[in-house]
Amino acid sequence: MQAYCETEKIKNILTASQVIVVTSHKNPDGDAIGSALGTYHFLKKMNKSVQVVLPDSFAPAFDWMPGAKEVVFFDKNKKRAEELIAQADLIFCQDYNALNRLGNMEVTLSKSKAKKILIDHHPDPEVTQFDALFSDVNYSSTCQMIYTLVENLVLDNYLDADAATCLYTGIMTDTGSFKFSSTTPQTHRVVASLIEKGANNAAIHTAVMDNNSEDRLRLTGFALSEKLTVDHKHGIAWFVLSQKELKKFYFQIGDTEGLVNYGLSIKGIEVAVLFTETDERIKISFRSKGKIIVNKFANKHFNGGGHIHAAGGQSNKTLDETVNDFIRLLPELSKQNLS
Ligand code: 5GP
Ligand code: MN
């Protein structure tokens, strides 16, 4: 997989820019929010004028993060978001590999004349959409990349405790609390430096992980006992949750985050999938371990993509039709070997 590490170019663009917007992908996860806010605190310390603009909201589990209240959401505050993007002379594009990952914000960003710097660990970046790239699938998280970039720019004295807290959060969530195979010795070195800079690891873990509502916990219990199908023959397990079921548990954004991983914890299961019915579409989450990869399958059959072991997709069919399509594809999915 080709990597890009255009540090000099990034340095020159950063030096020449004063008004900066930091963006991340739709349905922002911990790494998206952590990297956006980490960059925000770093740039503020550098005396840049900076705003984080995200396509839509994140889970309440991240509300406590330093700077979270300052984020402008494109779906809720379109005018302000458009203004900020129009005024920017630099836009950071973080934790996504192509502008189409921005949902409705894509058009506004593609019209912008600002320089665009990509920092991301997903495969196959749309290189022509950006002016400078730091793109490498070997990093655990975009937050780890931000730390490495700042260190390579010899600007790490501008990383304060708030930035360290945000970057730590993203690395922790994207590595499944440092257990996924993407976690390297370098990941731990970066995390050690972030703790030294003031990230309170235990407090961050508690704030993100021990922040369940009762409804969320009961939804998880219901999904585990009633909504999980396990196909031992193909080594695949999947959850299916309808709108009606989600509403019964007063679903909030983030309530199904991590649920899919329970499927992977079953002995002999190498792929786990979660189907959730939203207002507009069926959202699908794929996870795998070992030699089975899911991003190509998500792209080929469900208009999605992502990492080799964690990908997403969607369908405009009904929930039942989508799941039936998927069941027909089980033999193909079980053969998605890394090669
Ligand atoms: P999740 O299942 O948590 O929504 O997403 C897992 C991974 O797949 C994340 O890295 C996310 O960026 C990526 N992903 C999710 N949905 C899509 C999609 O529709 N298209 C692409 N290209 N990637 C996606
Ligand atoms: Mn990420």
Image (cartoon, rainbow, N blue to C red):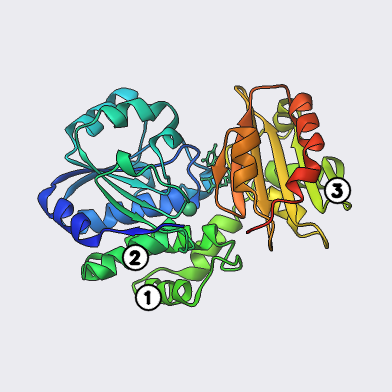
- Which secondary structure, mark 1? helix
Residue type indicated by callout 2: Tyr
Q: Which residue is mark 1?
A: 193
Category of crowding for the residue at label 1, using alpha-carbon neighbours closer than 10 angstroms: few (below 14), some (14–19), many (at least 20): some
239 vs 84: above or below: below
- One can see residue 66 in this view: no
> Of callouts 2 and 3, which one flags the residue occurring earlier in the amino acid sequence?
2
Q: Which residue is mark 3?
A: 230
Q: Quadrant of the C terminus?
A: bottom right
Residue at (22%, 65%) from the top-left corner? Answer: 158
- Is 160 displayed left or right of 100 in the figure? left
State how far apart marks 1 and 2 are (Cα). 9 Å
- Which secondary structure, mark 2? helix
Place of residue 254 in the rendered image (x, y in percent of width and height, measured from the top left): 59, 43
Mark 1 vs 2: CB contact within 8 A = yes
Q: Which residue is mark 2?
A: 147
